[in-house]
Image: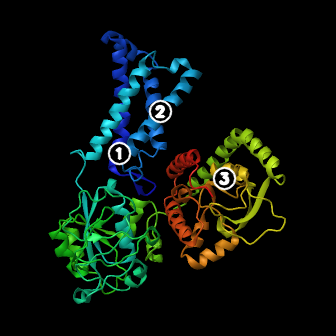
Amino acid sequence: MKIGGQRIPGKTLVLILSEGALIGCGLLFATALRLHDLDALRQQLSEAGTLARYLLVIAACDLALYYYDLYDLSMVRRRTILFARLLQALGVACLILAVFYYVDPDLSLGRGVAVIAAPIIISFVIGWRLLVDAGLPFLRRSQRILIMGSGQVGKSLAQEIAARPELNVEIVGFLDEEPSSRNTSIEPAAPEAATEFDRRAPQAGNVYAIDVGSNSDVLRNSDLRRLSFAAVSEGDIGAAVPANFDTTPQSTESAFSVLGTVGDVERVAIREAADMVVLALSERRGQMPLKELLNLKFLGIQVEEAHDMYERIAGRIVLDQLSPSWLILSNGFRKSQALLAAKRTSDIVISLVAFLMMFPVAVLVAIAILIESGRPLLFRQQRIGLRGETFQIIKFRSMWHESTPGKPAWTSDQDPRITRVGQFIRKFRLDEIPQLINVLLGEMSLIGPRPEQPQFVQMLERNIPYYGQRHSLRPGITGWAQVKCGYGATIQESRMKLEYDLFYIKHLSLTLDLAILFETGKVLLSGRGAK
């Protein structure tokens, strides 16, 4: 299953569907214990509205689990965190249900059922999570992939896979691009020399170093006969350094080796029982073994572009080694008039409803700003919108007013310009309520790439390829990049946000917009990513 073009791991789908069923079974079991009579149970289940009451409980529990990131398997690794979040999520679900029952007592399952059901549901869900985490036999075997090429995109793909064990993908190794390197001795290099190392092919038997963050359990099923991907600092994402054969894997290391050269692809893929060969060549001219790849294709082994696989598992289009021809020939980037009309209609309807609902909150925010720092209440600034046209964005003022505007600068975490009220309203995005007016005027959309200041756009277009393509859609109050990586305050962060923006533009759909709205709700409740 995919949302937009991003693959949802099978393990996540299993959890969502099975836990909904387990919660329903827990409710049924609790009802049976409360009534002590099979006939009474049958009578209650046959009553009108019983199914709706069960579905309300299941929906409240599933939403609470979702908003506590318990279906994002890359977020929760340790069991202590898992148990704590499960208890918090189910506790919040109980509070939500209590509010519903207070407003409409007829929605209640009956006296005593909720008290009995709560510990049963908690036990069912925790026990099921432990079983799934241990690896149930119905989960498919790992997909084994061989990465052909030592380019940067291949290293980035390996890092992404190593950080996501829920994908159930195993990298069997790399194939080097330069045959001559098999007889070349490479001395170990420090992490700072990663850029220089990228210009040199590693000796067959050497390894790359790729940061896998804090995911210490990603290698529990790895074959430790292979060599190690030694961790480097988080700031050197995707960087590579050679390591020696006798490097001992540490708790944060992944284990993959260089198994040969590009010309060995057929022999190595068959020997390692690879299910897929991923093309990550930095230069294809004169290096693509067409005959060998064709033979593998006819043997049933998949052959896929590294950019395509990265896009599918990470939800973004990596810019490393990205050619214009890939963008031109790639599926997607369709903007039918019907889709754009439906998106604009939903923008108007949702913005009107949201503005009416948030109006009391907007009044309180305006009063708080007025008391702390006086007028003006609103902040206006030039931004770049659809097709590169400028417009004035409207926000509640969250910084001290400057009579003479200073030099444009990105906002930092501890920016002294931000007021105390501003810190609060920025954390929960309340400063963006007036942007609903921009949406109604047609200058913005609810969902789209975040609009930037003209000075920053000019600078970023000089430093980041394809940056200007993000202006092919109306900018949004929220968006795929905003919910995935928050505020970008550096060129590198802006580059990553562009990768998410390109993914959103490619897979534009109302389904993806709905998923972004759900994620935005999670961000608003947590207050994360604000600056």
| x and y percentages locating residue 71 in the rendered image | 41, 46
Nearest to the observer: residue 367 or residue 105: 367
Quadrant where the C terminus lies? Answer: bottom right
The answer for how far apart the CA atoms under marks 3 and 1 are is: 33 Å
Residue denoted by label 1: 79
| x and y percentages locating residue 411 in the rendered image | 66, 64
Residue 269 position (above or below residue 59): below
Front: mark 3 or 1? 1
Nearest to the observer: residue 438 or residue 83: 83
| x and y percentages locating residue 491 in the rendered image | 57, 72
The answer for how far apart the CA atoms under marks 3 and 2 are is: 28 Å
Residue denoted by label 2: 91
The answer for how far apart the CA atoms under marks 2 and 1 are is: 18 Å
Residue 127 position (above or below residue 304): above
Residue denoted by label 3: 426
Indicate how the structure is coloured in the image: rainbow
Q: Mark 3 or 1 closer to N-term? A: 1
Name the image quarter holding residue 397.
Answer: bottom right
Q: Mark 2 or 1 closer to N-term? A: 1
Amino acid under label 1? Answer: Arg
